[in-house]
Amino acid sequence: MKPRFETVRWIVATTLGLSLTAVSTWAGIADSPLPVLEAGKTTHHVYSVPGVQQNGALGTFFSCTSTDTATMQVSVEGFGSAGGGPETDAVANSLAVAPGATVTFATQSAVGIGVNMIIGFTSARGSARILATSKKLACTAFVADRSNDPATTSWQLNIIKKKTQKGD
C-alpha cells in the first residue's frame, strides 16, 4: 500500500504545484517577444504607437527616417485593441533603410500618400510598435482619410519611447 500512497501523493503535489505556477501571457506591445529582423543583429523596440485606426475610410501611416550612418532594418508591428500577440508579421514587413532615407508603412493604401509597405493590420483599432536594428530612427505616425487627396480628415498620433510616455 505504501508505494501506491507515495504515487498518489506525488501526483497531487505535482498537480497542485503546476496549478499554482503563474502562467505568462503576452499583453501586446509591452512584452511580446521581439522578432529577429536581421540575422546577427539585435532588434530594438524603438517606439510604441497607441491609437492605430483602420477601417473603410481611415488608415494609419508610420513614416520613419534613418539618422544612422549604416543601413538598418525597420518594421512596424500591429496589435489589436484586446492586447495579445502581434497581428502582423514584422519580419516579412521589414524594410532595409539606408542612411538618411525615409520609408512609410501603413495599415492600408491611400490616395495621395506614398506607402512603401502595407503591414497587414486586421483590427479596426489597436496599437503598434516600431522596431529597428538601430535606435537611430526618427518617426511620426498619423491617421488619415485614405480615400481623399488631400486627406480631409487626419490627426497626429503620439509616439512614445518604448514604454515611457513624456511626463512619466
Image (cartoon, grey):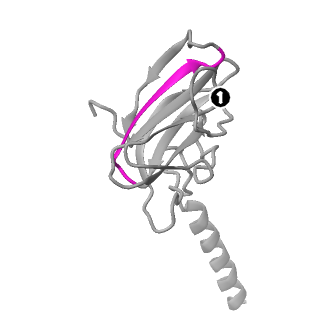
| Secondary structure character of the magenta stretch overall | strand
Residue in the picture at 68% in, 90% down: 2
Q: Which residues are magenta?
A: 134-147
- Residue beneath label 1, please? 109
The residue at the point 63 percent across, 13 percent down is 148
Inspect this view and state whether residue 30 appears. Answer: no
Say above or below: 15 vs 67.
Answer: below
- Is residue 3 inside the magenta stretch? no
Point 60% across, 47% down: residue = 93
- Residue 56's place in the image compared with 137, above or below, is above
Left or right of 140 on screen, residue 21: right
Residue 39 at x, y percent in the picture: 51, 66
Asked which quadrant contains residue 54, the reply is top right
User: Mark 1 falls on what kind of element?
Assistant: loop
Q: Decide: few, some or many residues near mark 1? Use Cα within 10 Å; few <14, some 14-19, many ≥20.
A: some
The mark tally for this picture is 1
Q: Position of residue 80 (x, y in %)?
A: 61, 36
* Percent coordinates x, y for residue 43 in the rendering: 45, 57
